[in-house]
Image (cartoon, helix red, strand yellow):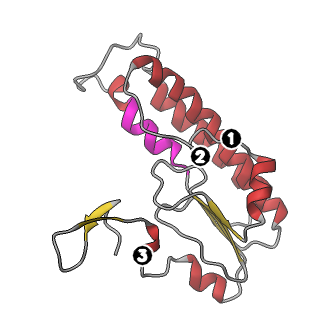
Amino acid sequence: GYLHTQQLRPGTYEVMQTDASVVSTEPFYVPLARAGHKVIVVDLSVDRPRPMKNLVQVIDWATEFKLYHYSTTPRSVRNFVDRVSPDHPLTRYGATDPSENYLLALNDRLQSGCTLKGRLIRALMDEHADWSVMFAGFCEIHKAGHFFWQYQDPCHPGFAGEAHPLAAALDMAYAHLDAQLAQVADKAGPDTNI
């Protein structure tokens, strides 16, 4: 039932504002939690709170598009998030300014956000040590792809040359993400399917 933040009201031509609360199907993790698996979900896109036993959720804490609003399940997890990784640069993020100075600052914000996301995930793994399924979305790389591809691709109309300060921004974003994923994988251990 979810297509976009604005969509037609079913059966009409009336445009309505919408969010993840209209999604009628259960995400993949609900049957797993219901079956007794301890599940941790961090920033799954188009998600909403689903209070249930065996489920820890962090919703729209650090996502590119706010398709719900920052919340947690259980609610007490929010205090934990605020203690462990406060002030992710995307938690209260608005529109992106495409000016070069803004994008230079955005590059730094996305890298620090990726580090904060990795720290939070590892802390949740410690706090809920009996977890058996975990999903974490790193939207930082998505935003980097949108705004930094032009500086890497010589065929892009916005390409500014290999000497531009953002020429390696996308590669750096992937390297930074890979480093965070490696730390999560190390914490998960060699017997964990990834």
| Residue 149 as seen in the image, left or right of residue 75 | left
* Residue occupying the point 45% across, 59% down: 67
* Amino acid type, callout 1: Asp
The one nearer the camera, 83 or 156, is: 83
The alpha-carbon separation of the residues under discs 3 and 2 comes to 22 Å
Vertical comparison of 65 with 57: above or below: above
Give yes or no for contact between labels 1 and 2 (Cβ–Cβ under 8 Å): yes
The one nearer the camera, 76 or 109, is: 76
Neighbours of disc 2 within 10 Å: few (<14), some (14-19), many (20+): some
* Amino acid type, callout 3: Val
Residue 87 numbered mark, or none: 1
Vertical comparison of 177 with 192: above or below: above
Residue designated by label 2: 91
Of callouts 1 and 3, the N-terminal one: 3
Res. 178 in view: yes
The alpha-carbon separation of the residues under discs 1 and 3 comes to 28 Å
Residue designated by label 3: 23
Q: Residue placed farthest to the bottom in the image?
A: 35
* Amino acid type, callout 2: Thr
